Image (tube, rainbow, N blue to C red):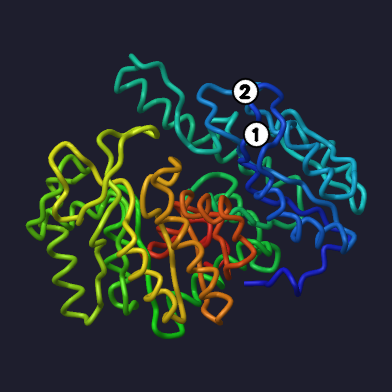
Amino acid sequence: MININDFSFAGKRAIVRVDFNVPLDKSTLAVTDDTRIRGALPTIKKIIGDGGSAILMSHLGRPKKGPEEKFSLKHVIAALSDHLGGKNIKFADDCLKAKDLADSLQHGEILLLENLRFYAEEEGKPRLADDATEEEKKEAKTQLKASQKEFVSTLASYADVYVNDAFGTAHRAHGSTALIADHYDADHKMFGYLINSELQSMDKVLTAPDKPFTAIMGGAKVSDKILVIENLLDKVHNLLIGGGMTYTFVKAMGGKIGSSICEEDKLDLARSILKKAESKGVKVYIPTDAINADKFDADANTGESKTDETPDGWMGLDIGQETIQTYEEVIKNSKTVLWNGPMGVFEMEKFAAGTSAVAQALAKATANGAFTLIGGGDSVAAINKNKLADKVSYVSTGGGAMLEYIEGKELPGIKAIRG
């Protein structure tokens, strides 16, 4: 596998899978958060700086039945151009009819292709009527499989080199993330700088973490994180639990949880996790106190209680001060910290203190020499909300991809390059 640093793009056209799935203003369709665009810049600059040309491809949103104006990638051109000093960005409004534009690219030029997901071939999922028969579904799948090969082959024909720099979609076996790589030999396909950084950061945490290693797992459901937690139990020293999943653990231990969210069918699973952790010498921290609400609402009345003594009719929506202090102390004494999932409903200001406290604690730990990896949409949002993205070691761009990598799964977009 070749490293992008060791490759010269001089005189070559590179087709680059970037992640420009960025939020747009509903009325102006202007980019409202350019984080992912900025993440792709080092790779783009390397290609054109070497004297090559870059053909960028991405998805945007979830178009269901083909082209939709609100999902057109032309809306990201202005933001991308701004970050490249006003550089002109060429645009192909049809992914399958961009051969002439690609062939005519001069050294240092950039071409952006239209949204890949305007084509069913990208995801490999037929677009059928709701009342389609089983026979129609089967026939559509057969036809799509054949047309997907043509789709991928066409994209590959535009360039001499393939670069995957979209970690957020690396867990998808899509045309642009996995299948296209088969059209290039090992010396002409590689990861971009963003994916390299993602993999280096996660491999550092998973294979060679400085000790003590602490994982912070939040979010609503134990079931969403079970594979991650089980894989981490062989690696971590401390596991801090937060968010709605707290109450599945609390109830599993016999606590009173009021109206708090709870996966009733996962109580045995929670007990199993605690038992496995104990057998492996992992210290599991479950919140001991909480900020409660009388309803799930930003204007709800609030109260405090022990997590295992939640009053009837009340639900825990954030960790309390006692838990915050405990978690801050554990994080402070850790050398490696992985954070995925909020401590509470941080979108509501009344229930944001716990998540913000963890974010601040991670920044302090980083300043003291710890390696801190943040992943998952909500955790990243919390870091950004507290303006701490530059105060932690690494903020992952791939929520689902990161979780699957930590679970130990093989990601199609990664395997396609690594082999």
Image: 244 above or below 253:
above
Q: CA distance from mark 1 to mark 2?
A: 8 Å
Which of the two discs, 1 and 2, labels the residue nearer the N terminus?
Answer: 2
Q: Which amino acid type is marked by label 2?
A: Pro
Left or right: 163 as drawn, with respect to 129: right
Residue located at (64% from left, 56% from top): 165
Q: Quadrant of residue 396?
A: bottom right
Q: Residues within 10 Å of mark 1 (few under 14, many from 20)?
A: many
Which residue sits furthest bottom? Answer: 211
Percent of width and height locating residue 18: 66, 49
Instruction: Say if mark 1 contacts mark 2, CB within 8 Å.
Output: yes
Q: Nearer the viewer, residue 156 or 222?
A: 222
Q: Which amino acid type is marked by label 1?
A: Asn
Circle 2 SS class: loop
Q: Nearer the viewer, residue 268 or 12?
A: 268
Residue located at (65% from left, 34% from top): 115
Circle 1 SS class: loop
Image: 336 above or below 27:
below
Q: Which residue is mark 2?
A: 67
Q: Which residue is mark 1?
A: 115
Residue 124's disc number = none
Image: 233 above or below 108:
below
Left or right: 309 as drawn, with respect to 13: left
In this view of the protein, can residue 142 be seen by the observer? Answer: yes
Residue located at (55% from left, 69% from top): 363
Q: Quadrant of residue 237?
A: bottom left
